[in-house]
Image: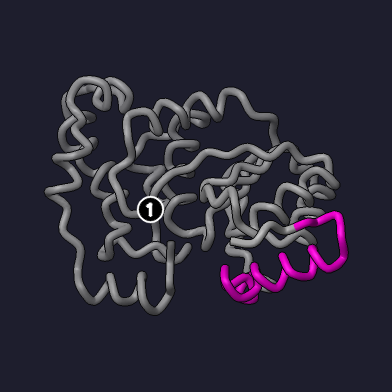
Amino acid sequence: MPDFDLTTTSGRVAASFDAMWRDHSFLRVWWQNAYWISDEMVRTNQPWPFQIRRWARRGIRTMVNLRGGFDTSFHELEKAACAESGIVPVNFTVNSRDAPSKEQIHGAKALFESIAYPALMHCKSGADRVGLVSVLYLHFRKGEPIDRALRMLNWRYGHFRQGRTGVLDFFFERYLSEGAAKGLSLLDWVDTAYNPTELRAEFRSQPWANVLVDKILRRE
């Protein structure tokens, strides 16, 4: 991966070109998949710098990157745009095709207790990873029960539970059937009964959905 020098015009052009085609950012110039899920939190796909500046004008104080990608063009552009706009960038990497770890669940709760609001969180497409963390946000920050907050993992945002990304739904469904049914909080269940390795092994996706999500939509 090239080292993008955003202090030069050529470096910015190179980074924008790389993000446009390597990261498929041309799809997100007009389509942001952006929704206010409360009066203080937005979920969206990977924003362009001009979109970050627009969010800053709307009062966003913190931007949470759920993707990782710390050596990429899109991340360099995001960091620079946040710095120019006065937004605090925060990295909290999660997976879209793996059972969330215990550390990630506890980390999400700590994240929501520490960041400044209004805030924005994003992954690449605004469908899967941001859906997972949106469920956790509504549960931990807003006190919504998991079965209600699960609306954040929905086809309207581009999430398909039939594909490998359905392991995220499977995690919450397992909690509802094994933890909530016994009166356990999500964190109590995660700490005492949850086994990510077993859950991952038990989950089954549908081949047609894997083709749609991985090959056609080309999700991370």
Q: Main secondary structure of the magenta part?
A: helix
Q: Which residue shows up at 79% across the image and 63% down it?
A: 11
Q: Position of residue 12 (x, y in %)?
A: 80, 64
What's the magenta region? Answer: 5-28
Question: Does 127 lie within the magenta span?
Answer: no
- Where is mark 1, residue-wise? 96
Q: Residue 148: x percent and y percent?
A: 38, 43
Which of the pair 161/26 is nearer the observer?
Answer: 26
Who's the residue at 68% across and 40% down the image?
Answer: 89
> In front here: 76 or 105?
76
Q: Position of residue 48 (x, y in %)?
A: 71, 62
**Residue 162, above or below 5:** below
For the C terminus, the image quarter is bottom left
Looking at the rendered structure, the kind of residue marked 1 is: Ser
Image quadrant where one finds the N terminus:
bottom right
Q: Decide: is 218 above or below 137.
A: below
Q: Residue at x 70, y 73 (%)?
A: 17
Mark 1 surroundings: few (<14), some (14-19) or many (≥20) residues within 10 A? many
* Image coordinates for residue 135, horizontal then vertical, percent: 43, 42
Tell me, yes or no, whether the highlighted magenta stretch contains residue 18: yes
Q: Could you say whether the residue bearing mark 1 is in a helix, strand or loop?
A: loop
Q: Residue at x 64, y 53 (%)?
A: 75
